[in-house]
Amino acid sequence: EDKVVQSPLSLVVHEGDTVTLNCSYEVTNFRSLLWYKQEKKAPTFLFMLTSSGIEKKSGRLSSILDKKELSSILNITATQTGDSAIYLCAVKQNAGGTSYGKLTFGQGTILTVHP
Amino acid sequence: GAGVSQSPRYKVAKRGQDVALRCDPISGHVSLFWYQQALGQGPEFLTYFQNEAQLDKSGLPSDRFFAERPEGSVSTLKIQRTQQEDSAVYLCASSQGISYEQYFGPGTRLTVT
């Protein structure tokens, strides 16, 4: 059965701290790994990673994929209270059969940043 | 609008009632997905449309769940004879295709009492 596991499940930090969120996966026909940020509404897209070892960056956020270890990390530096959210990791599988690019999600990491 | 929209945003139903949840995808997106997100969990796949064709409904939890997208744009997820275990947030997402990211709507929070 396809599985995506995130750790930690929750994390409480203070503004200015750096955090690392982990995602590991066991899926067939891996295509890409995606990170989303979910506040009280729609998950918003952060990164899509397809190639191993290539870091993607956007401001204070960065992410990297390790296909050998079947894992990814999401780093947030100099955290702010606005970073408080649930961070979701999802894996997309190759088309064919019944996968059609559907996403298999982890359970999410709840990040709380205190002032 | 530029994003995916869903309505209603909140729905309270009595056990046994039928409900209909609507999704308006981003214009031109051929792929449309429905996900169910229980409290404290990540979203789980329900069904997938490519244009008007429902190509995968393997995630629908029972035959009380039915989805359609008759003209390849707006989609409706219908739940018949709602049960308490149906209480969840129902998320819709659309995409240009398999190689592209999925954009999510704000979800409909369904509470069955």
Image (spheres, coloured by chain):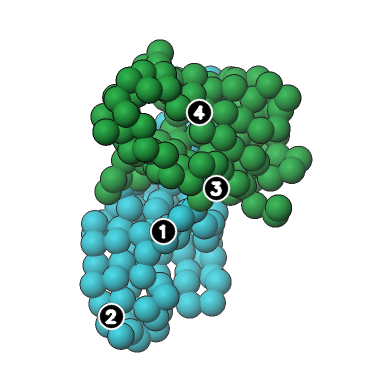
Counting other residues with Cα less than 10 Å from the Cα at mark 4, is it few (<14), some (14-19), or many (20 or more)?
A: some
Q: Are marks 2 and 1 in contact (CB under 8 Å)?
A: no
Q: Which residue is mark 1?
A: A40
- Eyeballing the image, is A21 above or below A42? below
Q: Position of residue B106 (x, y in %)?
A: 51, 50
Q: Nearer the viewer, residue B16 or A7?
A: B16
How far is the residue under mark 4 from the one under mark 2?
39 Å
Label 1 element class = loop
Distance in Å between CA atoms under marks 2 and 3 = 28 Å
**B53 versus B100 height, above or below:** above
The amino acid pointed to by label 3 is Gly
Image mark 4: chain: B
Label 4's element?
strand
Q: Are marks 4 and 1 in contact (CB under 8 Å)?
A: no
Chain of the residue where label 2 is placed in the rendered structure = A
Residue A59 placement (x, y as % from top left): 54, 77
Mark number for residue B105? Answer: 3
Residue at 36% over, 18% down: B81
Disc 1 crowd rating (10 Å Cα; few below 14, some 14-19, many 20+) is: few
Secondary element type, mark 3: loop
Q: Earlier in the sequence, mark 4 or mark 3?
A: 4
Mark 1–mark 3 CB contact (< 8 Å): no
The spot of residue B27 in percent (x, y) is: 74, 43
Circle 2 sits in a helix, a strand or a loop, which is it? Answer: strand
Q: Nearer the viewer, mark 4 or mark 1?
A: 4
* Residue that mark 4 sits on: B20
Mark sitting on residue A114: 2
